[in-house]
Image (spheres, rainbow, N blue to C red):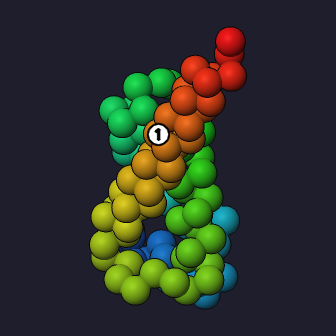
Amino acid sequence: MLAKPNRPHESDADLVRHIVMGDGRERAEAELYARYQRRAYLYGLKHLRDADAAWDLAQEALATLLKKIRARELADPERLGSFLLGICRLLALGERRTQARRKKLLAVYAE
């Protein structure tokens, strides 16, 4: 089930600051998750053409995003959406490569 944003009036940069500084971290993380979960899911659905794979991609992308924020590896908090879509792109590319390798191996060894 997709989450709904609770505090759309706070900017992405404000939420990142809360996460990095630790004040209201859980609420800020939940808000970022709610704000970007649908976008990541739809990206995965478009590029992977599988609802379960898209859901997995969204979860992994958001977990990676929060990890990067906590580690202070996000250079421009105002471009958070673009950063997340970059993560999604890399994860989708990796998943498509994995699927292609599996398909090739099955074709070779299925006999």
> Which of the image's four quarters has the N terminus?
top right
Identity of the residue furthest to the top in this view: 111
**Relative to 64, is 44 on the left or the right?**
left
Task: Pick the residue in front: 110 or 8.
Answer: 110
Local crowd size for mark 1, using a 10 Å CA cut-off: few (<14), some (14–19), many (≥20): some
Q: Which residue in the protein does label 1 denote? A: 96
In the image, residue 60 sits, relative to residue 84, either above or below, namely above
Can residue 62 be seen here?
Answer: yes
Task: Pick the residue in front: 79 or 31.
Answer: 79
At x 50%, y 49%, the residue is: 94
In the image, residue 40 sits, relative to residue 81, either above or below, namely above
**Relative to 99, is 74 on the left or the right?**
left
Q: Quadrant of residue 27?
A: bottom right
Amino acid type at circle 1 is Arg
Q: Position of residue 75 (x, y in %)?
A: 40, 86
At x 33%, y 32%, the residue is: 46
Q: Position of residue 97 (x, y in %)?
A: 49, 43
Q: Position of residue 28 (x, y in %)?
A: 56, 66
In the image, residue 51 sits, relative to residue 17, either above or below, namely above
Q: Quadrant of residue 62?
A: bottom right
Q: How many marks overall?
A: 1
Kind of element beneath mark 1? helix
At x 43%, y 48%, the residue is: 93
Can residue 42 be seen here?
Answer: no
> Which of the image's four quarters has the C terminus?
top right
Q: Quadrant of residue 8?
A: bottom left
Q: Position of residue 101 (x, y in %)?
A: 56, 37
Task: Pick the residue in front: 89 or 28.
Answer: 89
